[in-house]
């Protein structure tokens, strides 16, 4: 495997531009074909009962009467200048970019806390299951992970609300995102399925390393099992998980919508759902572009960091 040279990084950046162009076109096309009239929805959101003449006048003002390709080109050129338009219904007249920026940090906080919770549980459980392969503790961990990946996330969130917010009253059911207590339930909901998946990944990676020749040789030389596990097996088995961790961070930033709605969390996902139900297409279009860009940037950063962490990724040219 070759390292990521400057030429490769430039090639990846060009690929990102092409992918973003495709995503922008498909997103704009789907919102264009979606049922409903954004102009009428905008007037209704302002508490008005518009006439057909008022709707047509607003459509003309918003440029919705133009051909599709002209609407797309005008929107794309504006996006390239950092102008993603203004909100139609959620916050009428407010720039979409400022709306997303306000919601970005709460979503990042939620995603980071979910990742931390996931790592705290999945890494020890995966190691424990691998070390005690085909023993009772291994079967218990594997059974728990099977349950974790099987149940839907919204069900987990509702159960956590019922137990810890309604019955025990330890944490609030509605999350404001302002303090740690309000982040616990939504973060645990996101981390639940991820913990099950990563526990399996850690178990598989550790088992693969335990069957490598260098482990057999170390045992033959009398090296302690503890030193083999902590000094060699764990560092090598954790390397493939770095890529998965980066991809999970990207998917979390775009996939927290259901959890944010359940807990009324003020994040980007909740904003996107409200935009979809309110026909606020500029917000939807910008949200999809932002999430796609964040996902690809994180993926590129992970690939570059992986190249530096693992010496086997670097070869002399």
Image (cartoon, rainbow, N blue to C red):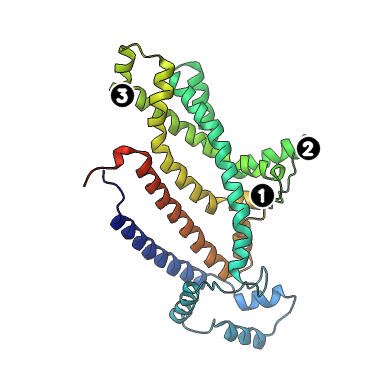
Q: Verify CB contact (< 8 Å) between mark 3 and mark 1.
A: no
Residue for badge 2: 169
Q: Which of the pair 174/226 is nearer the observer?
A: 226
Report the front residue among 242 and 29. Answer: 242
Residue 137 is situated, as x and y percent measured from the top left of the image, at 51, 19
Note whether residue 223 is visible: yes
- Quarter holding residue 102: bottom right
CA–CA distance in space, label 2 to label 3: 49 Å
Query: Given this view, does label 2 or label 3 mark the residue nearer the observer?
Result: 3
Q: Quadrant of the N terminus?
A: top left
| Spatial separation of the CA atoms under disc 1 and disc 2 | 17 Å
Q: Nearer the viewer, mark 1 or mark 2?
A: 2
Say whether residue 31 is left or right of residue 177. left
**Of callouts 1 and 2, the N-terminal one:** 2
Position of 172 relative to 71 (above/below): above
The circle on residue 274 is none
Q: Which residue is mark 1?
A: 262
Say which element carries label 1.
Answer: helix
Seen in the picture, residue 178 relative to 100 is either above or below; the reply is: above
According to the image, label 3 marks what residue?
212
């Amino acid at each position: 495997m070759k390292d990521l040279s400057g030429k490769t990084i430039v090639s990846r950046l060009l690929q990102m531009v092409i992918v973003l162009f495709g995503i922008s076109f498909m997103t704009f096309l789907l919102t264009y074909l979606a049922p409903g009239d954004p102009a009428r929805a905008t007037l209704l959101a302002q508490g008005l009962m518009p006439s057909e003449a008022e709707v047509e006048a607003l459509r003309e003002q918003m440029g919705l009467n133009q051909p599709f390709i002209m609407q797309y080109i005008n929107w794309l050129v504006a996006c390239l200048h950092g102008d993603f338009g203004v909100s139609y219904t959620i916050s009428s007249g407010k720039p979409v970019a400022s709306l997303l920026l306000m919601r970005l940090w709460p979503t990042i906080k939620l995603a980071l806390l979910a990742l931390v919770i996931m790592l705290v549980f999945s890494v020890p459980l995966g190691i424990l299951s691998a070390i005690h392969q085909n023993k009772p503790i291994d079967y218990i961990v594997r059974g728990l992970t099977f349950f974790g990946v099987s149940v839907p996330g919204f069900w987990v969130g509702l159960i956590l609300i019922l137990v810890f917010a309604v019955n025990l009253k330890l944490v609030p059911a509605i999350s404001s995102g302002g303090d740690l207590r309000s982040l616990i339930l939504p973060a645990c909901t996101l981390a639940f399925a991820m913990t099950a998946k990563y526990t399996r990944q850690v178990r598989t990676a550790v088992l693969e390393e335990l069957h490598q020749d260098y482990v057999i040789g170390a045992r033959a030389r009398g090296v302690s099992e503890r030193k083999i596990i902590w000094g060699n097996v764990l560092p090598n088995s954790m390397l493939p998980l770095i890529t998965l961790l980066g991809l999970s961070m990207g998917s979390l930033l775009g996939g927290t919508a259901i959890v944010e709605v359940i807990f009324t969390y003020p994040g980007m996902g909740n904003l996107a759902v409200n935009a979809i139900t309110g026909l606020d297409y500029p917000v939807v279009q910008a949200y999809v572009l932002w999430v796609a860009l964040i996902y690809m940037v994180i993926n590129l950063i992970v690939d570059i960091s992986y190249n530096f962490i693992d010496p086997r990724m670097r070869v002399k040219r």
